Image (cartoon, coloured by chain):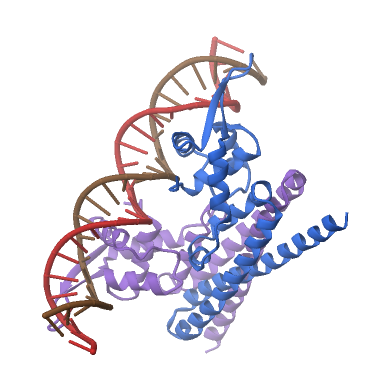
Chain colours: A blue, B purple, C brown, D red
DNA sequence: AGGTTCATGTAACCCGTTACATGATTTC
DNA sequence: GAAATCATGTAACGGGTTACATGAACCT
């Protein structure tokens, strides 16, 4: 089933690396730059319950002697499928305008769950959409800039720069995948 | 009387430029790169009602002959005060980690509602916090990079680049305010 | 006269935030 | 034996999304 929050996908992605408990996941969000996700129990435990209810993960309580009881979650095959579907769906213009965070999350787990071919395809699609969006921002700045206050203009300029940076990143990332592919083929 | 969503502040900021209707505001969100806000009526009209209930804006129905009836909103003095307080509060580390969008929104309306002095102060504070955050991301990449998949590493690299771009932007924006101040003084 | 745009709203649903609660285990 | 940390949860609240509803004015 569709209808999962970003947090749900982040959890699914992390659980695909290895089985983890809710507490493990909270620590990851608290101690790593991974997304901007909340490490609060009120977000994570309900999200795990929803994933389980939808059949995307299953869990088992571990009571290793001497250790605290932990409920370990792992994705089901249906969960893996749903994740990959979400991850590899084509990039549309609106993703670049309104959902850059989601795009980066999708890419973060690309190697592990979809492979290098999908990673390269993703980067190409992203580069295309970003390259298409930047001129429209420039155009807006050119047309509307005069009647905007300085700080507004500068804020827009900041947005443009950040998309330019993103575009540059996709290109350098693509080069890395290309190099890797060549080396792999040579071996 | 705190507790306002980002959308609430965006609306307050726009209403400070000139009185507008809900429909005006929707069009702005639909047709400008302003934030990533929703232009859906289900978001905007309730948000305006909340602002009015909290005394931050007031509204009046206009029935100019021959025109459609429009409800025009404008900020109250208490609304202006609340906006400026939010806008000029000191920048903390967590803002840079979790709330860059909010920071840019605060800055967008800086000239109009707080003035150039506050704008420069804001940029200095932002530069300081961003400059402090970047090394910790680099450190994380250095320590954890080896055990991360390529796509994860690249995603993190993208985040670092975007903070570097933001830092560069704050500096160039600061130069602009400095220049402007000098020119103003010379006059 | 009929379709489009203007303009304002409401209701169900989902989910994140904040705060609270509970108990076990480790640490000093 | 007290405090901190581990570990899992729940409940109230706020607010955004989606979808639906309504009617007036404008266009052809």
Nearer to us in this view, C17 or A81: A81
User: Can residue B89 be seen here?
Assistant: yes
The answer to whether residue B127 is above or below residue A39 is below
Query: Is residue B15 in sight in this rendering?
Result: no
Toward the viewer: B124 or C10? C10
Q: Which residue is drawn at 55% across and 24% down?
A: A60
**Residue sitting at 46 percent across and 58 percent down?**
B89
Q: What is the quadrant of the C terminus of chain A in the image? A: bottom right
- Residue A170 location in percent, x, y? 67, 65
Give the x, y percent position of residue A97: 50, 67
Left or right: B97 in relation to C4? right
Task: Judge from the rendering whether residue A53 lies leftward or rightward of residue A157; answer left or right.
Answer: left
Q: Please count the marks in the image.
A: 0
Please state which of residues A133 and A30 is positioned toward the viewer in this rendering.
Answer: A133
Q: Residue at x 63, y 51 (%)?
A: A108
Can you give x and y, in whole percent of width and height, for residue B127 in the image?
A: 61, 63
Q: Position of residue B20 (x, y in %)?
A: 28, 73
| Residue at 17% over, 70% down | B60
Q: Residue A90 is drawn in which quadrant?
A: bottom right
Report whether A129 appears left or right of B35: right
Name the quarter where the N terminus of chain A is drawn: top left
Q: In this view, does A86 lie above or below B31?
A: above
């Amino acid at each position: 089933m569709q209808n999962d929050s970003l947090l749900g996908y982040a959890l699914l992605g992390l659980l695909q690396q290895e089985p983890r408990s809710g507490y493990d996941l909270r620590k990851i969000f608290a101690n790593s730059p991974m997304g901007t996700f909340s490490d609060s129990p009120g977000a994570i435990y309900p999200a795990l319950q929803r994933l389980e209810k939808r059949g995307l993960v299953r869990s088992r309580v571990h009571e290793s002697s001497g250790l605290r009881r932990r409920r370990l979650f792992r994705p089901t095959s249906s969960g893996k499928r749903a994740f990959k579907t979400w991850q590899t769906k084509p990039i549309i213009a609106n993703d670049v305008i309104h959902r850059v965070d989601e795009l980066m999350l999708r890419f973060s787990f690309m190697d592990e769950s979809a492979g290098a071919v999908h990673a390269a395809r993703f980067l190409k699609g992203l580069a295309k959409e970003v390259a298409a969006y930047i001129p429209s921002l420039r155009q807006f700045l050119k047309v509307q800039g005069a009647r905007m206050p300085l700080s507004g203009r500068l804020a827009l300029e900041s947005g443009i720069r950040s998309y330019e940076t993103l575009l540059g990143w996709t290109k350098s990332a693509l080069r890395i995948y290309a190099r890797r592919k060549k080396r792999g083929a040579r071996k």
